[in-house]
Image: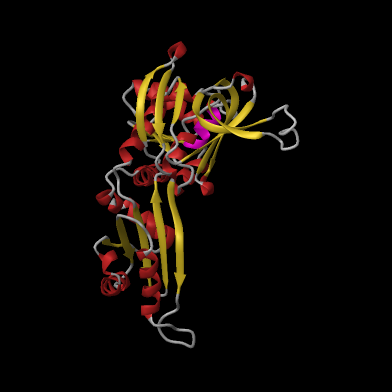
């Protein structure tokens, strides 16, 4: 994320002009924007004309600069686009005021947001700005007859490639080199700064040796890590061990993996944790919350009035922050976030156990 300018808007609102530089940034913005926010940007809009030449064409698209009052936000992940809809409240053409319009925000589009930002929303934008300096990372996990490649993004990890090639003995067995060749070819096509190669036993080292011999442009990017599994479980082990942090100084998902492990361990042993909105709100009132864990999609629903909690989540967050606690907003796209969702979307690691 690149922040172009910051200033003050009307009625005490803060105004930030920024440029999302990748799909991660678009995802971040989808969790910052809420109903009633003002968003400005350049767009095109079909204008219906009354002259004879245009009457049968359905109108002509014109470029214009508009400001909308947000009513709906959709992160179209696979289209690399953020759709922000709402009523036009300011426009370079006055005859368009009051109409509904959808801004399609893509990578490198400059937009201005004016709103009463909450502290965690500003933190999210600033973290995205800092993350622009982080290298792109993939995690490749490999064992006998199987290999997987996951990309690492701030909204989670995603499996991009999966290979199976039975090795060893038998009618359908293939040489190990065929599996390594597929893996090396796929990695060589990926424009990344670092590759973590992980898995059990010696297979990963043999794969690295093959890649070193056949894809010399790739091997310098590789860091080898031991894990007991491959695939999603292997990726979780890599994140938990901090291997990504060594090449990507700030990664939200490795922090989330650590926090959710601490939470689940506390639940299993009856230690200093709370989960569910009632328990967490009570712990916050007692000043017992050391780290608040809240799911991004649930937080957004509650703030938009579409949730079902009887407690104001903003008051819980403010209470925790006033008492020196930390707030971690989890991605719903990543496995720790899905675990948190199963616990009601909110939990806390406590300073002391509540009776």
Identify which residue is drawn at 44% across, 41% down. Answer: 107
Q: Quadrant of residue 155?
A: top left
* Residue 200 colored in magenta in the image: no
Tell whether position 301 is magenta: yes
Q: Residue furthest top?
A: 11
Q: Along the horizontal axis of the image, is 155 left or right of 75?
A: left
Q: Position of residue 351 (x, y in %)?
A: 32, 31
The count of marks equals 0
Residue 148 in view: yes
State the residue at coordinates (61%, 35%). 61
Is residue 241 depicted above or below 43 in this figure?
below
Compare residues 21 and 225 and report the one nearer the observer.
Answer: 21
Magenta residues, start to end: 296-302
Give the left or right position of residue 84, taking residue 268 as reference: right
Q: Where does residue 257 sit, x and y in percent of width and height?
A: 38, 47
| Residue 291 appears in view | no
Above or below, 61 against 212 in this view is above
State the residue lying farthest toward the front. 53
Q: For this rendering, which residue is in front, 51 or 342? A: 51
Whole-percent x, y for residue 72 in the image: 58, 31
Q: Is residue 65 left or right of residue 252?
A: right
């Amino acid at each position: 994320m690149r922040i172009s300018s910051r200033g003050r808007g009307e009625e005490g609102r803060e105004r930030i002009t920024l440029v999302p530089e990748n799909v991660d940034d678009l995802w971040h913005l989808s969790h910052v924007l809420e109903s009633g926010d003002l968003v400005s940007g350049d767009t095109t809009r079909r204008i219906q004309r009354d002259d004879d030449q245009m009457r049968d064409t359905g109108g002509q698209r014109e470029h214009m600069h508009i400001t909308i009052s947000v009513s709906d936000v959709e992160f179209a992940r696979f289209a690399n686009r953020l759709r922000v809809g709402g009523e036009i409240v300011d426009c370079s053409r006055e005859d368009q005021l009051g109409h509904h319009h959808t801004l399609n925000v893509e990578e490198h589009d400059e937009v201005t947001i004016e709103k009463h930002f909450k502290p965690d929303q500003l933190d999210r934008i600033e973290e995205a700005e800092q993350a622009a300096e982080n290298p792109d990372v993939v995690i490749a996990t490999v064992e006998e007859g199987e290999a997987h490649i996951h990309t690492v993004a701030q909204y989670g990890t995603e499996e991009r490639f999966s290979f199976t090639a039975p090795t060893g003995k038998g009618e359908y067995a293939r040489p190990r080199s065929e599996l390594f060749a597929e893996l090396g070819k796929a990695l060589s096509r990926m424009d990344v700064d670092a590759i973590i190669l992980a898995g059990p036993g010696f297979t990963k080292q043999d794969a690295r040796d093959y890649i070193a011999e056949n894809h010399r442009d790739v091997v310098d990017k590789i860091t080898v890590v031991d894990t007991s599994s491959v695939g999603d479980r292997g990726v979780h082990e890599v994140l938990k061990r901090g291997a990504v942090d060594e090449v990507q100084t700030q990664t939200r998902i490795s922090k989330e993996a650590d926090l959710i492990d601490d939470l689940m361990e506390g639940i299993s042993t009856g230690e200093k944790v709370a989960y569910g909105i009632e328990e967490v709100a009570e712990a916050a009132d007692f000043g017992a919350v050391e780290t608040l864990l809240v799911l991004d999609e649930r937080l957004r629903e509650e703030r938009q009035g579409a949730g079902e909690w009887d407690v104001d989540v903003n008051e819980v967050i403010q209470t925790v922050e006033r008492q020196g606690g930390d707030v971690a907003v989890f991605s719903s796209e990543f496995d720790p976030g899905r675990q948190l969702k199963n616990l009601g979307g909110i939990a806390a690691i406590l300073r002391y156990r509540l009776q």
